[in-house]
């Protein structure tokens, strides 16, 4: 199996889609798996030892020693290797084990690893609550919510946006990704909401002289990350949502909408800032599995 792992890592490097640190992490994860198999089997592992039972047993053992992010990366590395082995004909069928119970039980600071996604009725209730408020900051908050629900942008990227990053005429948003060229994201729905904020909300918030930030606070300066968290939390409470509204729940609601709309997986990965494509692939698989289960009920 060592030869196949080496070929897999070389393929990743050739694709030029993964950072060197990611490939190094994968190499370490797969070495851990190989060491586990050798100790468990009492011999060097072969390709046929790569199966769902061995993967599950390995990850169940690892959860006692790994942090959640490390366990996720282990899972991603094994999934990608399995797909590679199936595509190259080294194994006939690759069926990755269902890992929700492993990943959910492996917690960080007591927070379950569970993605909370808003239903369309909850989204409607949330937007109705903010639209009913006549204040200028509500126009800003409406634009923030609409933008995240359409693009899935992280809080860091939201607060980093400048006025020049939104082109109202083309209805598009610039997403800077140094050192690469800027990417422009076409806005399908939230463009008018952003324009309304710029015309009616932002001027009334009295932006400081020379302030270039797209989203500003009540004191006229660039909105902070903590400010965005508080805004989302407040509107979640006002809309009587079942759980606390967070940037993460909004971002993954956006991802769900993108999947339904048929966005390319690479686009979803870039918008959600997933450094490892397998993380995006795992989310899409979980979403599709949940959808199929509901259809069969």
Image (cartoon, helix red, strand yellow):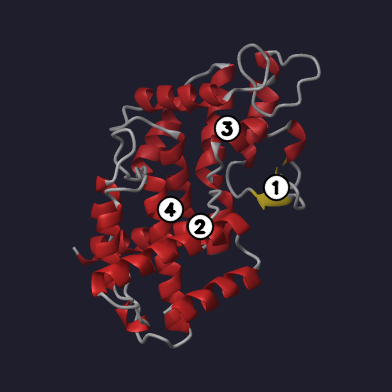
Residue pictured at 32% horizontal, 45% vertical: 114
**How packed is label 4: few (under 14 Cα within 10 Å), some, or many (20 or more)?**
many
Nearest the eye: 141 or 276: 276
Calculate the distance from the C-alpha at mark 4 to the C-alpha at mark 2.
Answer: 28 Å
**How packed is label 3: few (under 14 Cα within 10 Å), some, or many (20 or more)?**
many
Tell me if residue 17 can be seen.
yes
Which residue does the numbered mark 2 point to in the structure image?
Answer: 25
Tell me if residue 53 can be seen.
no
Q: Are marks 2 and 3 in contact (CB under 8 Å)?
A: no
Calculate the distance from the C-alpha at mark 2 to the C-alpha at mark 3.
Answer: 38 Å
Which residue does the numbered mark 1 point to in the structure image?
Answer: 177
Q: Is residue 90 above or below residue 35?
A: below
Disc 3, SS:
helix
Which residue does the numbered mark 3 point to in the structure image?
Answer: 143
Q: Marks 3 and 1: which is nearer the front? A: 1
Q: Is residue 189 left or right of residue 186?
A: left
Q: Marks 1 and 2: which is nearer the front? A: 2
Query: In the image, residue 228 lies at what x, y percent?
Result: 52, 26
Residue pictured at 33% horizontal, 76% vertical: 50
Q: Is residue 30 above or below residue 7?
A: above
């Amino acid at each position: 199996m060592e030869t196949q792992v080496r070929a897999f890592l070389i393929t990743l490097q050739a694709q030029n889609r993964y950072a060197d640190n990611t490939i190094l992490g994968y190499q370490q994860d797969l070495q851990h798996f190989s060491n586990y198999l050798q100790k468990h089997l009492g011999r060097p592992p072969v390709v046929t030892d790569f199966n769902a039972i061995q993967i599950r047993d390995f990850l169940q053992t690892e959860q006692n020693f790994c942090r959640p992010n490390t366990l996720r990366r282990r899972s991603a590395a094994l999934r990608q290797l399995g797909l590679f082995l199936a595509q190259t004909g080294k194994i006939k069928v690759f069926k990755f084990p269902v890992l929700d119970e492993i990943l959910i039980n492996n917690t960080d600071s007591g927070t379950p690893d569970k993605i909370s996604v808003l239903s369309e009725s909850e989204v409607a209730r949330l937007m109705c609550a903010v639209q009913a408020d006549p204040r200028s900051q509500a126009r800003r908050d409406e634009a923030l919510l609409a933008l995240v629900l359409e693009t899935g942008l992280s809080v860091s990227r939201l607060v980093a946006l400048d006025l020049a990053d939104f082109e109202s005429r083309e209805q598009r948003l610039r997403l800077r990704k140094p050192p690469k060229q800027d990417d422009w994201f076409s806005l399908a729905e939230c463009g008018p909401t952003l324009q309304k904020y710029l015309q009616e909300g932002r001027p009334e918030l009295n932006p400081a002289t020379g302030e270039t930030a797209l989203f500003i606070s009540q004191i006229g300066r660039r909105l902070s990350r903590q400010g965005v968290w508080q805004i989302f939390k407040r509107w979640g409470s006002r809309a009587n949502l079942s759980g606390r509204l967070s940037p993460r729940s909004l971002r993954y609601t956006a991802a769900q909408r993108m999947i339904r709309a048929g966005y390319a997986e690479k686009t979803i990965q870039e918008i959600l800032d997933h450094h490892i494509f397998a993380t995006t692939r795992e989310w899409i698989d979980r979403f599709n599995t949940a959808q199929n289960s509901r259809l069969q009920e």
